[in-house]
Image (cartoon, rainbow, N blue to C red):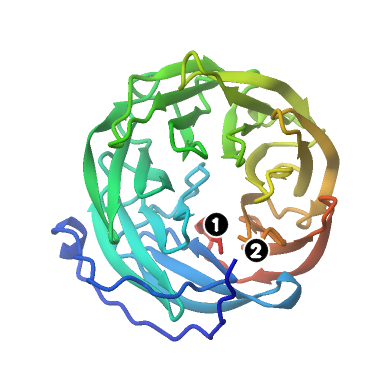
Amino acid sequence: MSLIRRRTLGPLSLAFTMASITAAPVRARPDDEDSLAPGLVFTSSNAVDGNEVLVYRRGRGGSLTPGPRHATGGLGDGAGLGSQGAVTLSDDGRYLFVVNAGSHSLSVFGVGEHGLRLRAIVDSGGLHPISVTEHNGLVYVLNDGGAGNVAGFRNVRGEPKPVQGAVRGLSVAGGAAPAQVGLSDDGAVLVVTEKNTNRLTSYAVNAEGGIGTPVVTPSPGLTPFGFAFNRRNRLVVTEAQGGAAAASTVSSYRFGHDSAAQPVVVSASIRDTQGSACWVAITPSGRFAYVANTGSSSVSSYRISTAGAVELAAAVAGTTGAGSAPADTAISSDGRYLFVRSGGTRSISSFGIHADGSLDAAPSTAGLPGAAVGLAAS
C-alpha cells in the first residue's frame, strides 16, 4: 500500500437552492480526485431543513477532531432511519454516498486530499431512501417508503446513472421494514435484511448491474438488521430478537454454487447475551466482527473462521456509556480503529483494535446532531 501524505481539510462552502433537489443531477467535473484523504470519519445530520455531511479527522489513538460540514443538497427526515448504510464510502475510497430520506434522493461527494466536493444529486429510484452500497462502480439504494424497493446505478465519475433492469421489489409489497442493502465482496449478490418479515431477500447481479428476481430466505433469528461481508464472501448478520433483553444473536452465511443468490446458513443465531444487536462491522482481515448492542450500550466481538462460522469472542468487548444507545459502526481502512455512533449521547466512541481482536477505548467525541445517521471511515 502506498503512503499518502495527510493534510488538513480546508473549508468548503456549498450553497444550493431547493430546486436543485429535483433538477437534473449536478454534473461531475472532468478531473478525478487525484489523492485520497486518509483518517476521516463521516456521518450525516439527517436534518429536515437540509441534510449535511459531518467530517471528523482521526488523530493519534483514534480520537476525532470535528472538521467541516457539507450540505448534501437534499433533505433528511429528522428521525432515526432504523438502518445501516445511510452513509457509505466506495470501495476505492474516492466517493462518499449519502441518502437524503426527506427528499428521496442520493448525494455523491468526491473524496480528495483537500476534503469533499459535491458531484451529483439524483433521485433514489423510490421513496425514503435509508441505505446505500457500492462495489466496483455499481451503486444500489434501498428505499423503504411505499412498497419498498432497491434501485441500481452505475457511478460514472461521480454521477450515478440508472442501470436497466436494476429496480426490484422486496419480499412483500409494503411493510417489510428493511434495514440495509449490501453487495457481496465479489459483487455477485445483493442482499437486503427485512426486520418485520424476519427474512433476507437477495438478488443475483449480472455484469451490467441488472439484478435478478428476489430470493427469499428465512432468518434463523428474529429481526435481522445490520450485516457485513468479509473478503471471503461470508455474510455476518445481526439479529435484534425483537429487542428482548440479553437475547441478541448473530448468524453467518455463505453462498452456494448451485444458486448464486441463495444464502446458506453457516452459524445460526449465536448469542452475545446483550440487548438489541443491530449494527455490525468487520475488520479488513475478515477475522473479527464488532456488533453494537443498542439496548445494552455495549459492543460485542465475534471471531470469524475461514469457513464463515462465527463464535463469540467477548460479550462486552467495549462500552459506550450508560444510555448511549450505540448504533452505526465503522472500521478504519487500515483496520486499526473501530468507531461507534451513539444516538443517546449524540457522540462517536473510538476504540483501538488489537491483533487479537480486543478493544481499547479512546476519548469519545460529542456534539452530533440529534437526528444523525450513518457512519463511514477511511
In the image, which is nearer the foreground, mark 2 or mark 1? 1
* Position above or below: 367 against 327: below
Q: CA distance from mark 2 to mark 1?
A: 9 Å
Q: Is residue 54 visible?
A: yes
Q: Nearer the viewer, residue 241 or 64?
A: 64
Quadrant holding the N terminus: bottom right
Contact between marks 2 and 1 (CB within 8 A): the answer is yes
Identify the residue shown where x is 76% and y is 57%. 320
Quarter-of-image position of residue 52:
bottom left
Instruction: Estimate the x, y position of residue 173 in percent, counting from the top left.
Output: 33, 21
* Position above or below: 211 against 101: above
User: Which residue is label 2 attached to?
Assistant: 348
Instruction: Estimate the x, y position of residue 135 in percent, counting from the top left.
Output: 43, 46
* Position above or below: 151 against 329: above
Which label is found at residue 135? Answer: none
* Position above or below: 36 against 243: below
Name the residue type under label 1: Leu
As helix, strand or loop, the secondary structure at mark 2 comes to strand
- Crowding near pointer 1: few (<14 within 10 Å), some, many (20+)? many
Instruction: Estimate the x, y position of residue 243 in percent, counting from the top left.
Output: 67, 32
| First in residue order: circle 2 vs circle 1 | 2
Identify the residue shown where x is 76% and y is 73%. 61
User: Which residue is label 1 attached to?
Assistant: 375
Q: Is residue 272 visible?
A: no
